[in-house]
Each structure stands twice: as structure tokens, then as C-alpha cells.
Amino acid sequence: AGRYATFRDRLLMQQRPASAASGRGARAVDQESVLAMHRVLFSSEREFPCAWARQGFALRGGSFACGLKQHQGGPCGVLAVVQAMLVRHISVGGVLAASSEAAASRLIDSLAGIVWSARVGRLATVVSCRAPELPPMREAGDHLVQTSCRSEEEVRGAIQAAAGAYTRPSGGGVALLLYSMLLTRGLAMVARDADFPSPLVLPNGYCAQELVNFLLCGRAYSNVFDGERVVGEDGDGSPTRLRGIPRPVPVGFLTLFERQGSLLPALSGGDSAEGCVTVGSHLKQPEHPVYVIQSEAHYSVLWLASDAPPELDVADTFDVLYFDQLAEAEHPTRLTLRRGHSPPSHPPPLESVLLTRWPAAAVVDWNGAEPLL
């Protein structure tokens, strides 16, 4: 506990949120700030894993022009949130008929919106890189540049100016987005967001929930329920405040862990499953019917093939579109769900996730695609 307090104090002295910074324009990111950002990301001065360091936001092109391409497992949570934001910007009635040029422009909009959501006041920071590849952590200060922006439009302009660094397939786009988020929110604020000390990138190289929430709502909170909860009020110790999603978000989030938790009472013979994951309405009913899907350690994207979530007492069937940026598929998979159709006793993981959002419906047709097991 003492070591963590010391770490937080050091962060407070080293890094204020972007809203507290002075002046505008571009300047170098000092080396100590780079090391401090890595301590927040990894809880140590650790390099980005290769799968993260060499992952940019590259579009696939072809028939699904707005599809992102992921090279290796690891940063799928980051790619999935950006993909969901991109679908949100392009989708009209669930249809994504965009040219390569339009998709590239909306990608910049998506990245800008994510960075701007992390601001504390009216100032955000965009980090770019002079080198074609992300430099090693201890050399990054010679290559990284930060630009202060006073509006979302300025954020967009700064990312557009550095588009090559962000979208180069094996470039440092993922890392640059995270650096921008951290400096915009402020390292001390990010460290305080979590319920308990936690790295944003887990030791296994996957996203912590705090990182996914950071990208979805601009705050690195630890939970997926709505608002805040206080636990331990009836005990002898001090109560603990747990923070979830504070407001409705542009795109939502669904997780297999909620479905697995809902099965615990039946499996154990009990009446409840305390401590299980419960996704709140802010994430289940987002501003746009687009969802980041978490199936165990992997993240992908799903959206409705219509303008608004269907009312199941009116629509007997409806379609959703699913896309996995790590898979080789060149276009989304269309799934048809039907109200009142009983799901199989052991549905595939993706179908199980859908039951957390539409429990009265089940997948009846993969429309020629191979079911994902």
C-alpha cells in the first residue's frame, strides 16, 4: 500500500491532465513521461509486446473497406473499440457501404473522438512519432511529439497530420493512441480511476477491463455496471467505492463472462451468483447499436442490421452483423435471431454473448457461415 501511494504521489508531480497544461503547439515528449506512461500501462517500465508495438490502424480495403486488420493476438481490445467506433460513424441502417477514402476519413474521426473523450477540461494531447516504427521505450523521447489541442476538431487535425504513423500496418498506431489517451487524461487521474492498483495491459499481453473502459468512455474505471456502488458499509472496515460506466456511451459492450455467471446458480444449486459480472444499461443500450464483444480473452465487434434495437414483442426476427478484425474473413458475418426460439443447451460462445443482450431470442441461422465455436 505504501509503495502504491508513493507511486501515485510521483505521478501527481510528474504529470497533470492536459487541461492543466499551458500553451499549445507541438513539443517533444520528455523521456521521464514515457517511462511514467509505461509504469501506468504495465505497472513497470516494460516495453510494449511486439504484437502491440507493431500494430497500426490499417484498413483492409476490398469489399469491406472499413474493416481493420489485426496481425497478432494481444491488442484486440483496442482494435475492437476503434472498429466499433468506425462502424458507428459509417453505418446507415446497419449498411456499411463506404469507399476506401470515406473509411479512412471516418477512421480519423473515430480516433479523435476516443482521445477527446478522455479530456478532463477543454484540452487534449495527440502523440505522434517521427520514426516509421515505434522506438524502444528508453529511446522514445527522441522520436515522440505531443500536440496540445483545444477542440475535437483540432485533435482530428493533429491525428490527420500524423495519419501515416497511426495507420501504417506495422507502425505504432496502437501505442500512440494509448500515449495520447494517457497524457490527455493525466497519469495520476488514470491511476486513480481503477478500484485497485492494476495495469492497463495484463501480464499475458491482453487488455484489462480498465483499458477497454478507458477507450469506451474516457475513464479507466474497473467495472461494467452503471454508475457507482459502495461495498463494505456494514463491515468493520472503511467502505469501498467501486466505479462503473458513468453515462451512456457511443458504442456498447457485451461479455461472455456475464452469461457464464448467470449459469452459476443452476450449476451450484444456489440462488444467486454474487460477484458475477453484470453489464449495465449504459453499455447494453448505447447511443448506437454497435457492440464490442468479449468472448473470454478475445474482442471483436457486432452491430444491428437496422437503425435501432428491435422490440422483440414486435419483430419476430432480426439480423446482426459480426466482424473479427483478427480473422481472415473479408466481410462481416450475418446472423439471424428469432424471438422465442429456444437456444441450444450449450450454444457457441458468440451466441451465448448475444443472449446477455437479447435473452428472449436465439440465433437460428448463420446464413451459410461456419458457426464460431
Image (cartoon, rainbow, N blue to C red):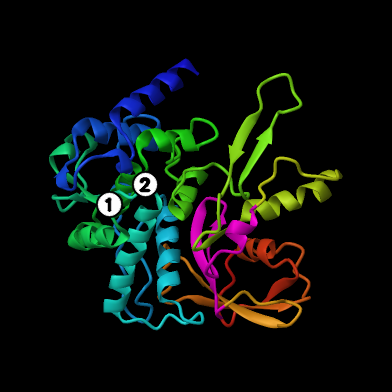
The percent position of residue 64, horizontal first and vertical second, equals 38, 78
Tell me the residue that label 2 is attached to. Answer: 121
Q: Residue 312 carries which label?
A: none
Which residue occupies 31% across, 82% down? 99
The percent position of residue 154, horizontal first and vertical second, equals 25, 59
Q: In this view, does 192 lie to the left or right of 169?
A: right
Give the secondary structure at mark 1. loop
User: Considering depth in this image, is 44 or 222 the residue closer to the camera?
Assistant: 222
Which residue occupies 53% across, 31% down? 196
The percent position of residue 206, horizontal first and vertical second, equals 45, 46
In the image, is residue 58 part of the stretch drawn in magenta?
no
Q: Earlier in the sequence, mark 2 or mark 1?
A: 1
Task: Residue type at mark 1: give it.
Answer: Arg
Please say if 296 is above or below 18. Answer: below
Please say if 73 is above or below 97. Answer: above
Please say if 141 is above or below 239. Answer: below
Find residue 47 and report its image quarter. Answer: top left
Find residue 360 and report its image quarter. Answer: bottom right
Which residue occupies 21% across, 39% down? 136
Task: Residue type at mark 2: give it.
Answer: Gly
Is residue 339 visible to us here?
A: yes
Magenta-tinted stretch:
279-307
Give the secondary structure at mark 2. loop
User: Considering depth in this image, is 284 or 332 the residue closer to the camera?
Assistant: 284
Tell me the residue that label 1 is attached to. Answer: 54
Q: Distance between the residues labelled 2 and 1?
A: 32 Å
